[in-house]
Amino acid sequence: QVHLVESGGGLVQPGGSLRLSCAASGSIFSIDDMGWYRQAPGKQRELVARIISSTITNYGDSVKGRFTISRENAKNTVSLQMNSLNPEDTAVYYCNAHIRRATGFTIEYWGQGTQVTVSA
């Protein structure tokens, strides 16, 4: 079994910053990629950022230039530094990972989600 555990959500004022972290644990052979998605009330889940390696990342259009994703392979963790937050960033943020098991199969996993609220 594999678990993704997020941390770092909370309430922040507009213009502020937050850092989210996600740690993967369990039966992991390797991790193909890790990322963050978010879902606001009444909206579809959308990509925030994804990282395959330190040189291969992609970001949702609405967060480019404000958010930075990073990954620490040795610890199976991914972090999301969020700057210049605005109320439109309010959502539940989900960690996502494609994890390769010892069997050779790659399986997609999701964390339980962490709430980020941007409000004055």
Image: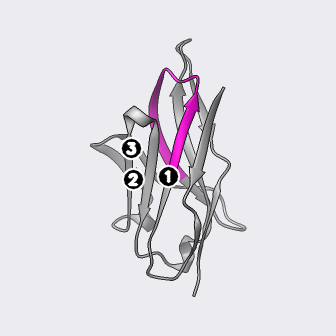
In the picture provided, is 35 more to the left or to the right than 5?
Answer: left
In the picture provided, is 7 more to the left or to the right than 33?
Answer: right
Location of residue 86 in the rendering, given as x and y in whole percent from the top left corner:
50, 78
Q: Residue sitting at 50 percent across and 52 percent down?
A: 21
Front-most of residues 50 and 9: 9
Task: Assign a secondary structure to mark 2.
Answer: strand
Q: Where's the N terminus, which quadrant? A: top right
Location of residue 10 in the rendering, given as x and y in whole percent from the top left corner:
59, 68
The kind of residue on which mark 1 rests is Ser
Write down the residue under mark 3: 71
Q: Gap between marks 3 and 1, in whole Å?
A: 10 Å
Q: Residue sitting at 38 percent across and 43 percent down?
A: 71
In the image, residue 99 above or below residue 117 = above
The kind of residue on which mark 3 rests is Arg
Give yes or no for contact between labels 2 and 3 (Cβ–Cβ under 8 Å): yes
- Closer to the N terminus: mark 3 or mark 1? 1
In the image, residue 55 above or below residue 15 = above
Q: Residue sitting at 37 percent across and 68 percent down?
A: 66
Q: Where's the C terminus, which quadrant? A: bottom right
Location of residue 95 in the rendering, given as x and y in whole percent from the top left corner:
56, 48
Dominant SS in magenta: strand
Q: Which class describes the residues within 10 Å of circle 3: few (<14), some (14-19), or many (20+)? A: many
In the picture provided, is 85 more to the left or to the right than 6?
Answer: left
The kind of residue on which mark 2 rests is Ile
In the image, residue 108 above or below residue 23 = above
